[in-house]
Image (cartoon, helix red, strand yellow):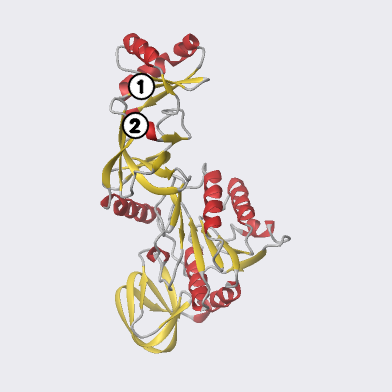
Amino acid sequence: MYRVEGPARLRVERGSFYALGRFYERGCELVVPRGLMICLKVIERCTVEVAGGALTEAKPEEEVIDRWRELAENLTERGRVVVVGETDSGKTTFSTFVLNTALSKGLSVALIDADVGQNDVGWPGTLALAYPSKPVSWLGELEPSAIYFVGSNTPMGCEDAVILGVTKLLRKASSKDLVLINTDGWVADRRALLYKARLVESTEPDALVVMEGTGASEALARVFENTKIRVVRAPTPPAAKGKERELRKMRRELSYLDLLGKATVKQVKLKDIRLWGAYTFNGRHDPKLSAALTVLMGFEVYVEDCGNAVVLVASDEQACRKLQDAKEQLAKLLNKEVYVSCLSGVKGVIVGLVDERLEHVGVGVLEGIDVKEGVVKLRTPFEVEGVRALILGRLKISEGGVERERGTPPLA
């Protein structure tokens, strides 16, 4: 047995080896991304061309490849499989094992990548659905057939969005023989336990695979032991290499850079779209109050009446601070809840694009909102003609794809 640490590319020139749930024979290539370590088992004495990375011999008792092969063979029946576990416990690699094993049996497979922080199939901040037609060396080779925008690189605070998104993607995948759901690594506290339990409950899997790791997921395994769900514990490779925080961030930023590299600046009309989860631009413009407050404050204020609330929109941070200072007095004057939105804070915010069918059809980055012109400018590689709503994410990224901050969406 051997271990190969990425980034590496192995090409078989003679013989064969087994890895990731498939056999690599003459002419086949195994690609190992940076930060991953893969075990391979020689089947027939072989010659392999190795480019990059490090290839070292491994003791059989130190590896889990044979056990994983056995588990993958037993799991690849028709139905649903959810894979859970702490960060760096082997979830993605084991999911690749199961995917490749199912394809080798001639099954049709759907994969839902439900890790918003390290999504291999879609983009950070999204969930993604893919229909693999051939074996893969890593999940990043797959193209998303559908996505669901969550807008954060952590499920914490977005648990309901992740569960809803997985449920919607699951409905699309229901016709496949095997649906495999790979999840994020948040498992280590009570809130995470409740979130994961609800995620499992909502998907109703036939099998729940729990990566053993350091034991952080054992409580979740025990939750479902006395139910109809088959709980399968999968060992974590002893030599599993944890990804450093900076490496995780770098992988996300490479994904952003890929998104932005294919994007152009496009415009959508404010009158044609709605912002989900916000008061701003979901009310009725009040021109009289706008004019009155513009005179009172000494700068232009755009006002929307949202029934029991009023939204005051300013174009820069200084104006927003003044509106915030006057917010309590204005609330008493208007006898309504008052919210303040600052348009200068939207640049760089990642957004999800939603069409009239409530399908999430793309991802973009806000460039700005021009109230006078009545347009939203965003950078995206996706078509915007049919977009009817924007979902504001909790992430901001620069033009170079660098994560700048994470917080609440900038518009009230």
Q: Are marks 2 and 1 in contact (CB under 8 Å)?
A: yes
Total numbered badges shown on the rendered structure:
2
Nearer to the camera, 17 or 237: 17
Q: Quadrant of residue 408?
A: top left
- On-image quarter of the C terminus: top left
Q: Residue at x 43, y 59 (%)?
A: 145
Residue beneath disc 2: 345
Looking at the picture, how far across and down is residue 55, in whole percent?
36, 77
Query: Is residue 350 among the parts visible in the rendering?
Result: yes
Query: Measuring 50% from the left and 59% from the top, which residue is drawn there?
Result: 112
In percent of width and height, residue 232 lies at 63, 67
Q: Amino acid at mark 1?
A: Cys
Q: Residue at x 58, y 74 (%)?
A: 71
Q: Position of residue 341 (x, y in %)?
A: 39, 26
Q: Earlier in the sequence, mark 2 or mark 1?
A: 1
Q: Residues within 10 Å of mark 2 (few under 14, many from 20)?
A: some
User: Is 253 or 52 nearer to us in this picture?
Assistant: 253
Q: Secondary structure at mark 2?
A: helix
Q: Residue furthest bottom?
A: 45
Task: Indicate which disc residue 320 carries.
Answer: 1
Task: Note whether residue 408 is visible.
Answer: no
